[in-house]
Amino acid sequence: MDNNSILLSVRNLSTHFFTAEGVVKAVQEVGFSIKKGQTFALVGESRCGKSTTALSIMRLVPSPQGKIIGGQIIFEGRNLLALSEKQMRAVRGNRIAMIFQEPMTSLNPVFTLGNQIAEAIKLHQKKRTRKAWAGAVEMLGKVGIADAAQRAREYPHQMSGGMRQRVMIAMAVSCRPALLIADEPTTALDAIVQAQILDLLDEQQKQNGMSILLITHNLGIVAQRADDVAVMYASRIVEVGDSQRLFAEPLHPYTRGLIYSLCVERDASCEKARFQSLTTHYALRRTKLIPGAVPEPLHFPAGCKFHPRCPTGYRDKRCQTFEPELKEVGPGRCVACWYAPGYE
Amino acid sequence: MIELPKGRSLLKDGLRRLLKRKLATVCLVVIAAYFLLAGFIYLAEFFDWQIGPTLWQEQAGESYAPPSSKNIFGTDIFGQSVLRKTLYGAKISITVALCASLVSIAIGVPLGAIGGYFRGFIDEIIVWLYSTLSSIPYILLILAFAVVLRERSILGHKLTGITAVYLAIGLTSWVGICRLIRGEVIKHKDRDYVLAAVSYGCSRRRIIFRHLLPNVFHIVIIDFSLRFVAFIHAEVILSFLGLGEANRPSWGAMINDARMELSRGVWWQMAAATAAIFIISLALNIFGDALRDSLDPKLRTV
């Protein structure tokens, strides 16, 4: 990999939560790299640690319960975990921005939309109020809101969910960050608006050469929009790879299970479902669910965390005792499974 | 061209709903009348107009004359018009209550916000402070402050009776608003919009004062209107105990005088003062409730 093109490199990141019931190891030894101008998807079911990973990159983990206990996050040549809070504030919103899942509650109810975007601009670009307001109106126009000058004077409770998410995106990209972290940006929106928001993100990416870290549990979005994918399960990354190849040839049993639970058979004689357009669903009775359930963070199984649900692992002594590390098995392909092809 | 609705802030929304209630509007008028009266008296004293309440010292009739067409509320022991004294008392009460409110808000709101946002050690100190303060009987505390402050001067400025009174009340009454603000801040600081604001680089001070406080400020407004009554009563009690403004008429002093007068059958001074206190208290209570119903976002029905 050409080092020049890597924007963010997460190495061995671990984040724990210290609760009354015990230590919740939300993120364990997570590592991945995002290239410049790329969309990197972090996929997994709920409670697998994806959002916590995103918050850890921004150093927004709720403390004192949560703490990043190890690892490095190299961004633009600096380790974000070693920066002071003041230096980190200069990064947030400016070089790395984040949009959240719930647009309905992510905006301050007592400020106008224009005010909120202008605040982000004022903080980082040191512009005066009038120029910041003009910048805010311009951003609103760029994210596709009609009558931007009028809308900027309105309040969040006067807007729909889709529009609020657009405003969040406007706030996030107003300072042209190098990396945008989108934490389930479309989960709370309906399907049509989802597509619009994703198109908007694509557009912003092309205009500014921005990288996107897309966190989602929706494989359909990942298949359509992501360049690289990392699959997370129970606080660890189990597979990383190029999006097309990962869907065509999943190496980890969990990834396989995820895809087969959505895909349908291409024809009756073909056992292995190949990657089709995930947005067309037919013959749902053919889909296969992964048996069992996601483990509780306080009671992770010993050995490989997926082994109780894995067709090969549930009987295997090695899978039950030893946890496989994430290892590279090909150019740009990593997997954490004892029985993955190429793993040793 | 579509006619787009104008931006409507939540506060304007709330005030609009408030004014739709007739009773609340009437109470607001009453409260405004008291304030205007106090303001008028200040003006009159400043410009030395000799009119109405400012002439409270003038002999308006015989000593202890009962209510008549000449003096609607009768006269006191010096023959001064009770009506004029009652009107003058409004100035004292409103001034004291207003200044005490400002002092207690100025202390209680920042402490509550800081404690609620930072939690941990700072919060524990603030909670300890106000718990201790609120455990001491209110009257004793105010008395102690009033007695101590009476003879002192701040920055070379001698503390007159009124100043001592409202400082005493303000310095001991910030506990309620502090608790309320602290509770609201704790609730709000984990909300998404705060996280979003931190994510684009707001400092903690900015979060507290620019993002959190406007969202909890409706509590201050509601508390202010309900608290005002308590401050008026506190002033009355202090004056009653002889610790208030000594040379000017105030409702508390009038009630104090009534202690001796009642045995002589002179009821009008006490009645006038009590009526004045009762009306403003009732108006503030009703208005405060209506305000809470209108401003609390969770109670919105329209």
Image: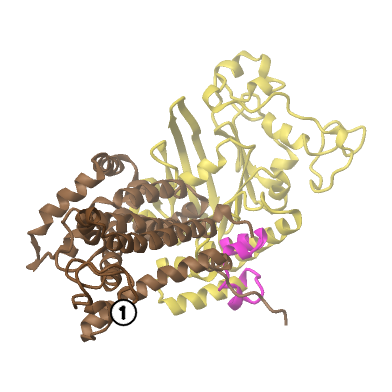
Residue at position x 63%, y 25% in the image: A306
State whether residue B194 is above or below residue B272: above
Q: How crowded is mark 1: few (under 14 residues within 10 Å), some or many (20 or more)?
A: some
| Chain shaded yellow | A
Residue at position x 67%, y 49% in the image: A187
Local secondary structure at mark 1? helix
Residue at position x 27%, y 54% in the image: B234
Question: Badge 1 is on which residue?
Answer: B40
Residue A148 visible to the viewer: yes
Q: Nearer the viewer, residue A286 or A295?
A: A295
Residue B206 visible to the viewer: no
B211 lies left or right of B232: right
Question: In which quarter of the view is residue B9 placed?
Answer: bottom right
Q: Percent from the top left, x then y, of residue B184?
A: 43, 49
Q: Which of B297 and B43 is in front in this view?
A: B43
Q: Quadrant of the C terminus of chain B?
A: bottom right
- Within the magenta stretch, is there residue A166? yes
Residue lying at the far right of the rendered structure:
A268
| Chain shaded brown | B
- Within the magenta stretch, is there residue A71? no
Total of numbered circles in the picture?
A: 1
Q: Percent from the top left, x then y, of residue A107?
A: 54, 59
Q: Percent from the top left, x then y, of residue A282?
A: 88, 42
- Magenta part of the protein: which range? A142-168
